[in-house]
Image: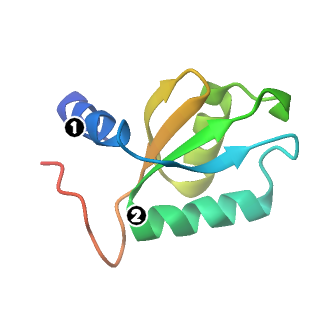
Amino acid sequence: MLTSKQRAKLRAMGTELDTIFQIGKGGISEETVKQISNALEARELIKARVLENSGYTAREAAEALAEETSADVVAVTGTRFVLYRESKNKKKIIID
């Protein structure tokens, strides 16, 4: 679980990230969860976007994916959200 200070630091870092995933009309599939989990392992911090035709709000998608991937929701802004999960093998982000 992240503290508010850690979440603020990650939120600031997340504003500069490129969006690497889009949740569209296919919704959240097993393949989507697998790809996001792999991206979290490699990068620790990712930004995704929910398209209007997905049937999800950004908050709903973020919470569903966070639960499926054991990640933390860092921020939800408009149609975009940022997820964080510490890498098991190569820790890149120091959030003390």
Instruction: Give 73 or 23, whichever is nearer the viewer.
Output: 23
Residue 66 falls left or right of residue 85: right
Q: Residue at x 80, y 41 (%)?
A: 24
* Residue furthest out toward the top: 78
Q: Which residue is mark 1?
A: 9
Q: Which residue is mark 2?
A: 43
Q: Residues under labels 2 and 1: Cα distance?
A: 16 Å
Q: Position of residue 66 (x, y in %)?
A: 55, 45
Q: Amino acid at mark 1?
A: Lys
Mark 2: amino acid: Arg
Residue 96 coordinates in the image, percent (x, y): 12, 48
Q: Nearer the viewer, residue 51 or 64?
A: 51
Give the number of the disc on residue 80.
Answer: none
Density class for disc 2 (Cα within 10 Å; few <14, some 14-19, many ≥20) is some
Closer to the chain start, of discs 2 and 1, is 1
Query: Where does the image place residue 92, in percent across and percent down from the top left?
Result: 25, 66
Total number of numbered labels?
A: 2
Q: In the orientation shown, which residue stands out farthest toward the bottom? A: 89
Q: Residue drawn 85% across and 30% down?
A: 53
Give the left or right position of residue 40, taking residue 31 as reference: left
- Secondary element at tag 2: helix
What residue is rendered at 51% in x and 54% in y? 70
Location of residue 60 in the rendering, given as x and y in whole percent from the top left corner:
66, 29
Q: Does residue 33 sit above or below 16 in this rendering?
A: below
How many other residues sit within 10 Å of disc 1, few (<14), some (14-19) or many (≥20)? some
Q: Is residue 51 above or below residue 23?
A: above
For the point 57% across and 20% down, the residue is 78
Occupied quadrant, residue 57: top right
- Secondary element under disc 1, as helix, strand or loop, is helix
Q: Residue furthest left?
A: 96
Q: Image quadrant of residue 80?
A: top right
